[in-house]
Image (cartoon, rainbow, N blue to C red):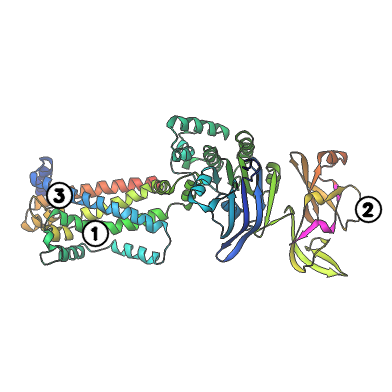
Amino acid sequence: MDYLVKGLTTALKLIFTFDPEVMNCTWVSLKVSSVAILLASLIGIPLGFLIGSNEFKGKRTTITLFNTLMALPTVVVGLFVFSFISRQGPLGVLGLLFTPTAMVIGQFILATPIIIALSISAIQGIDPRVRITAITLGARSYQVVTTIMREARFAIMAAIIAGFGRIIGEVGSAMMLGGNIRGYTRSITTAIALETSKGEFSLGLALGIILLTVALSVNIILRYLQQKTS
Amino acid sequence: MAMNKKEVPLIEIRDIAHLYNGKKVLEIPHLSFTRGKIYAVLGQNGSGKTTLLGILGLLLKPTSGRVFIEGKDVYSTQSLINDSRAMMTTVIQNPILFDTTVDKNIDFGLRMRGKTKEERRNIVEECLKMVRLDGFQKRKANELSGGESQRIAIARALAIRPQVLFLDEFTSNVDEKSIEVLEDVIKKVNQYYGSTVFLVTHDTHQAYKLADEVINLFDGKVVQSSLENLFKGAVTRVNDISIFDTGKMKMEVVTDREGIVYAAINPRDIVVSLQPLSSSARNSFHGKINKIFDDRSSLRLSIKAGEQFKVKITKESFIEMKLSVGSKVYLTFKSTAVEVF
């Protein structure tokens, strides 16, 4: 028990004294995940809109595919990207392996299907009368799109937050693609794995608390948005 | 020579046919509409009313046929479609309000047209007054009652000052007070803005009360007879005379058809009298008045005579005959007055 209490006390001390190691890992995590989620949103939301608002052959299969990809194992993504950017891989010359960019690529692949699948469902959840009403009131094509997006705004924000929640806490691809280089690609999750295995329980715990706080904040926002939409 | 704007029909449709899932739901050889009038499209569920409204309101391109707006074939260029759409608006059946405040809903069309904030504010205020919901600007749209939502949807349509306003079942699921307000708004919009109004309704009384002209649709086709007296029954031939039987009443009709058909009689073609008439008219029924409607210039009586009949008479005749609810009367009409289809 003493071990746990001591660990927790030291962890809180590390957090409140802004320990450089802790802050650095937190910064790497937030930076990599934010860039990945931004890129995933830029691709995923318009794609989700196109799939959700149009009828085409194979639509159901496409939706099933994205729903399945939501559960993509992080190590599989890590392995997949690794095979492309490792020295022997087709993109090896770019020297991306063990860089934050590689971590962003992995997390982008993890988050995009989530954003696409949830955006599809957000767009499909919008009453078709919204589109007709916008047209009857003189909205041009792009104005119709922005009107529908505005109506789906809370559900789309929830999609982004769900994607962020997924990647901020993943360890598999971050470890494989970032390489856990101290001060460079060491994120909260990869640091927890390393420090705990080294016996640095307090540091692992401190990072765990930060990660949970981030995850909690994400969930509080998500719940708030869901309440607002209902 | 350039034609005067007034001489060219505002909207004209030619050889229109519309298919839905391979089934023909609308077939109209020709219809034209004049600027500044109120038109009602009347018909039962599935008669093609909403399809016709969609075609006239340019929300639905007909499978075949042509639509002319102010004499121009509207589907010839995209800019013509856009320009024509900009002058009209449709309030769909059970309209939806955007998930925002009332004022943002009403000024939607104005924002799409790039109007200034000041202009938008003034128009929103004016439209809210028109639908008698002044002060509702900052209310949340999703917190309004059904009647209030409908009034806001109409105010939103009026905000763009449409030259043509299409209203699909605008008083369905609306409380009595809102119906009264909305009917009044329709008349005002027509009178003061000069807007041409198209109402789709299955409420016969409302159609005749508000409209200058009524278009009766039956099974996707325009029929000449008013559908107020529409009956389903079987035609059989007895000694070269066609007898139409609904099960509750029988009448003579002129038709080559036999079997199950629909028959319609224009309320204007039915003569009401206190005594049986000695005329050549082949159909005469005795019945009782159970409802009276005031239709601006005349009265409409609902009379139970086997089936429920609607009859139109002048106010003078009504007073002369001292009629009231419960009065027993004779209904007489010619067999040629019955349209069979």
Amino acid type of the residue tagged 1 in the rendering: Ile
What's the mark number on residue A109?
1
The answer to whether residue B173 of the structure is visible from this angle is no
Q: Is residue B338 rendered magenta in the image?
A: yes
Left or right of B191? Residue A23 is left
Residue that carries the numbered disc 2 in the rendered image: B278
Q: CA separation, marks 3 and 1?
A: 18 Å
Amino acid type of the residue tagged 2 in the rendering: Ser
Q: Nearer the viewer, mark 3 or mark 2?
A: 2
Q: Name the dominant secondary structure of the magenta segment.
A: strand
Residue A109 position in % (x across, y down): 24, 59
Circles 3, 2 touching at the beta carbon (< 8 Å)? no
What's the mark number on residue A46?
none
Circles 3, 1 touching at the beta carbon (< 8 Å)? no
Residue span colored magenta:
B328-341
Amino acid type of the residue tagged 3 in the rendering: Val
Is the residue at mark 3 from the same chain as the one at mark 1? Answer: yes
Residue A96 position in % (x across, y down): 13, 58
Position of the C terminus of chain B by quadrant:
bottom right
Circles 1, 2 touching at the beta carbon (< 8 Å)? no
Using the image as rendered, state which of residue A40 and residue B32 is in the foreground: B32
Is the residue at mark 3 from the same chain as the one at mark 2? Answer: no
Q: Chain of mark 3?
A: A
The answer to whether residue B171 of the structure is visible from this angle is yes
Element assignment for label 2: loop
Q: Residue furthest front?
A: B1
Using the image as rendered, state which of residue B281 and residue B205 is in the foreground: B281
Q: Closer to the N terminus: mark 3 or mark 1?
A: 3
Residue that carries the numbered disc 3 in the rendered image: A28
Residue B288 position in % (x across, y down): 83, 49
Q: Nearer the viewer, mark 3 or mark 1?
A: 1
